[in-house]
Amino acid sequence: MLKNLLLLTAFAVVATAQPAPTEVKEESKEIDIKAFIQKSIDDLQNGKVDGASWVIKDRKQSPTGESFSTLLVVPESDTNQTIDNNNSSKPVAMTDESDVLYEDLEGLSFAHDINYSKESFQATSTLTALPEDDLTESEKKLVKKVIDEKILVLHSDYNLKDKKYNLSFKDINTTAEKATIVAKNIKATGLYDVEKPLDNSMKFTIDSLDITPFTAEFLGDYLKMKNLKITSTSSVKDTKLDFSYSIDIDLYDANISKEHSKLSKLSVNMTFGNMDLATYKELEKFGKENPTTTLENQKLQELTTKLLTSKGIYAEINNLTIGDLIVEGEKMGSANITAKVSLEENKELAAMIAMNPLMALSSLNVDAKIELSKEMLRAIMKDKRAGLLAILPSKEVDGKIVYVIKYGKGKLTVNGQAL
């Protein structure tokens, strides 16, 4: 329970302290961040925010800023009770789905300080309370420590001139329950233009994370991570939409329950390109209007199929590199993969897929190159599901096992040999 609580706490900070500047004045088409933030807090205080139940308390306003606290409550669906505190608001009734998400977080609270001008804002949010239901005594002590030492603090800012935003957590160096935890430079930066919401970028980084238990039962266990970077970019080109993602990490090193795993120099770069913009917006709108829709919904299936058969659509692994991998003590070696999957234009493809998804194979194109170290190949071959590799023609280049795979018009070749 505590693990989920701490993970959702980070989400709650962003949800309550980082309002996105999305209001545009009709007469000037200029965004006033100060006006937007004040309106966002007013709406929250007056119970106009769907899917959450944040109560505003102790709100103080000045010409250049706001300070207030947010308290999460889960009101009963059949009550109109109010919270009898100064400057507090009525609880916002939540949907059943929200109840499931938030029911374990009732009592979660943050203190917020926001300073703003017409074109920028800076905010600091500090965790001030965590629910303690279902926690052990040691977990309750940890919660008290987190609150008393103000361990969870988020700083954020946004500027309209350059469209840049920054989020950063305060560094952590503490002893928690049975381990020491050191985390440095947890940050997120990016570009966001309210007038072009699908043209944006984000980079999330952690310089280092070190968790070291010190009790006899966990002696020798540890977790270390260095230089994690996750980036995402979305861009609009005429009627098309592209998404790009990348993950880079210099080191993940863990010894848990005497099982050693280590990953060095992971790099992943992927692109989903040429998606039809209008269909994506329609699918996004449908998802927001129907949050409980299942995958069996016919409208959802139609929109998804239409998006996945956009003219010129493709998915590409620009690069997947593993410098060195050890899993539970077994050396796996290294790997390098590039691949691109695309669909040939076919006006009847969507209808064909609706009848039988396998019919997409007739329009599928695949171009891939897989390079495996001999250690990696031996490790993979231990899995019975990888038996197909044994019959594929391979070649050795600079000590690596290489597979060049091409598929198109129903024909498959591996290293130039037809299969």
Image (spheres, helix red, strand yellow):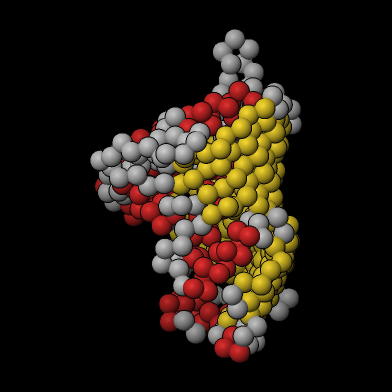
Tell which of 419 and 380 is nearer to you: 380
Tell which of 367 and 282 is nearer to you: 282
In the displayed structure, 389 sits above or below 122; it is: below
Visible residue check, residue 67: yes
- Residue 264 position within the rendered picture, expressed as x and y whole percent measured from the top left: 70, 72
Q: How many marks?
A: 0
Visible residue check, residue 415: no
Tell which of 258 and 138 is nearer to you: 138
- In the rendered structure, the answer to whether residue 315 lies left or right of residue 61 reads left
Give the residue drawn at x 48%, y 32%: 45
- Residue 185 position within the rendered picture, expressed as x and y whole percent measured from the top left: 73, 57
Q: Quadrant of residue 286?
A: top left
In the displayed structure, 48 sits above or below 343; it is: above
Give the residue drawn at x 43%, y 82%: 384
- Residue 309 position within the rendered picture, expressed as x and y whole percent measured from the top left: 42, 42
Give the residue drawn at x 62%, y 85%: 215
